[in-house]
Amino acid sequence: MDGLGDHAAELYTVLTGGSEATGDTEVRVDPDRLERRERDLLLATACAVLDRDSTDDNAQLAARLLLRGISRPVFTAAACAHLFARLADHTVTGGVRVAAGAMLRCPDFAVTDELRASAAALVERALVNGGWHAQDATLAVAGVAGPDSERMVVDRIRADIADSPLRLAELEVLRAANPVQRALVADEPERYEMGRVWERLPDAPHRLAAVPGYEAWARETLTAACARLTAIHARRLPYLADQAFSATDCDTLRRAARLGLELDQPWAGELLAELLPRVAVAPTVARTMPSQAACIQLALTVEAHPTPESVAAVHETYRVVRHSGVKKKLDRLVRRAERALANRPETAIRLPDLGVAPDGTARVQAGVHYAALTVEEDIDLTWRNAQDEPYVGVPAQVRRDFPAALTAANALRTKLRAQLRVLSRVLEDTYTFPTGYRYDRWRDNLATHPVGHSISDRLIWEYATGPDTWTSFLPTDGLPEPDPGTEVRLWHPVRATAEGRAYWRDRVLDGKIRQPFRQAFREQYAPPETGRGTAMFTGYVLRLEQALGLAVREGWTTEYDSLTRTFGDVRVTLPLGARLRPGATGWATAGDLALDRQLQDLHPLPVSEILRAVDLLISVSGYARNDTTLDFARWPELRRLSALPLTDMSRLRHDTLTRVLSPHIEAGRVTLSDHHVHVGNHAVHVATGRVTRDGEQVDVPVLQTRGTTPMPYLPYEERLLEHVLRMVELLLVGARQVEA
């Protein structure tokens, strides 16, 4: 096309199928070399390319690379009209979805005759296409096409959703909205292919709430669902397993819950606390449930947009559900939801008190007896009589005459324990990206909260006293009194001086403080490299069963031969060189850890936490070390070792170390624990060979030539064990030199 620069013209040729290059030719896309006019044209062309039924590989690749490089595109009115025209020119399966997304990303969107004609063509094609699933997008584009198209679309939608009163109510709200407002409902990136390229608009929830009647509809929808389940459990409506809600109803409930959770509305948590447990349990003793689909969809919504109240609702649902398959799914979902709460730090520390008094106690009355619950490091539950005398167990009268009170006391303890566990995990996960709180909110929601203080009192905090100046404190020593708006954050050894680390470690030891997670003695990691990766974990051989099991629990996902995870806004990839499919067994060798950001551009704290998470995988599932990942001669031995249980291998390694190091152990120079060999104040991890001193990484220079460092006799060949012993011997040599 005329008027384009060299790079833009090259991309346009590839996108329009004019390139004769083969699929093996590398396609390069550099958005920074494009002018605004060129970006508009190429964005429209790329969107149309991705929506075709079929196209060549080069065009598909170029389109994806371009849209990944411009993940938040902004269309001009001319570019939007161009996109509509291109979508209308060829056969597409979901052109209305792409068109609706472009409308939202066009600040000066305006309807013209040309645009109206293209929209009418898109709507007609969507109506003809059997089994269409883009109702909201089609309704949005129909608003551009004109009254006739809109009337046909509304009639079609009504016919398709006749069995869903919840969805019909939403349709009436959308009919009164303008086309761009309708497009907000259709813009669900996770629901279709374009979503993996376009990021969802950050202000989408607030714009949706501004649509007249939409937020009220969301609340009424969840309320109506609760009423229906109440009627089913009261036997006013017949119970049929998985028939309480249609598939359309379930999708509608998901959208209503998502809006409330994204806006963090109080009604969302309250209604989900009522809705989720009821939708997961049959009114009979059967293991079936009113709607498995609704239960899972709502739980997935909580995972994506968690609040403390909604996570507690999923916890309660997990406790009461009888369906074993759903129980397993909820277990995974609630763990991921707890971790996702760290992305909403101000929301995460908002804890319900669950009836606990300001002094951290709660009572459940049962006749003349009562259950006394005390929130401390754990939740203490003691039964007492009218004279306040404690019982060793549960009084017989309570078991016999007050089973409901006994159940309520145990359920309250379970909820409080879950609340403390969630809060502890959330606070620890905030280390992966710098998080601070307003002092007044932190004080009210944590430090003086009837439940939250149990966690915050045992953690070290620091508040800002000036630019890059922080003062650390322990709440049990007394709360400081800075300005209410002062920032407060968790203390971390990476951000502290050596003197500060030593002070707080001594303070924790002297005070015998049991911290909810490792803080004062937290491990620290600092990669020696710069750039987008590190070779710290390269060459470790992992047992796939343990590695994948732990990875799923910790929030990693599999992508063919790699594990990926997002820490804040940093995406991390750990290649394992093996096909990672469900149920994979055998072994794999870790490659260089890759990040999508430069290490030198990141704060040392998130870098340390990222490497700590990777080291956890290595420590738990590693059983050998391969200095050369293509050392084929060692494969039979690695395959033999991979068939042994890790507990047996660990026991064998521990026994070998005990025997080999026995002279040093007897002399008191070395001590051996379950996971470390200790030499003075140094520790060598027996699963990775990593050397630390009080949690801080220590670089020990190792000469690779055999015999350079005194090595004891090894009863069998294993490079990981050899590496551990080499570290121990080097530390012993250093200790002798210090003594000399």
Image (tube, helix red, strand yellow):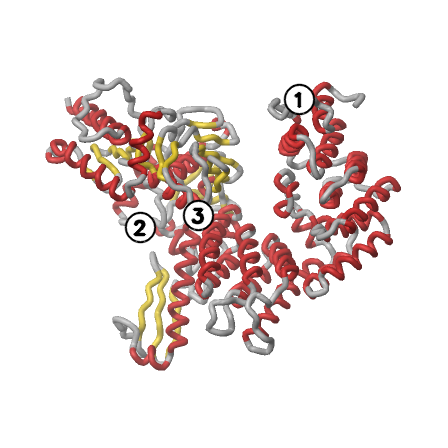
What percent of the width, then of the height, locates residue 1?
A: 79, 23
- Residue 100 lies left or right of residue 339; in this view the side is right
Residue shown at the point (85%, 44%) measured from the top left: 116
Q: What distance separates the C-alpha of mark 3 from that of mark 2?
A: 16 Å
**Residue at the disc numbered 2:** 514
- Residue 709 lies left or right of residue 26; in this view the side is left
Q: Residues within 10 Å of mark 3 (few under 14, many from 20)?
A: many
Q: Are marks 2 and 1 in contact (CB under 8 Å)?
A: no
* Residue closer to the observer: 107 or 159: 159
What percent of the width, then of the height, locates residue 377?
A: 34, 56
Q: Are marks 3 and 2 in contact (CB under 8 Å)?
A: no
**Residue at the disc numbered 3:** 427
Q: What distance separates the C-alpha of mark 1 from that of mark 3?
A: 52 Å
Residue shown at the point (51%, 70%) measured from the top left: 282
**What amino acid is at disc 2?**
Arg
Q: Residues within 10 Å of mark 1 (few under 14, many from 20)?
A: few
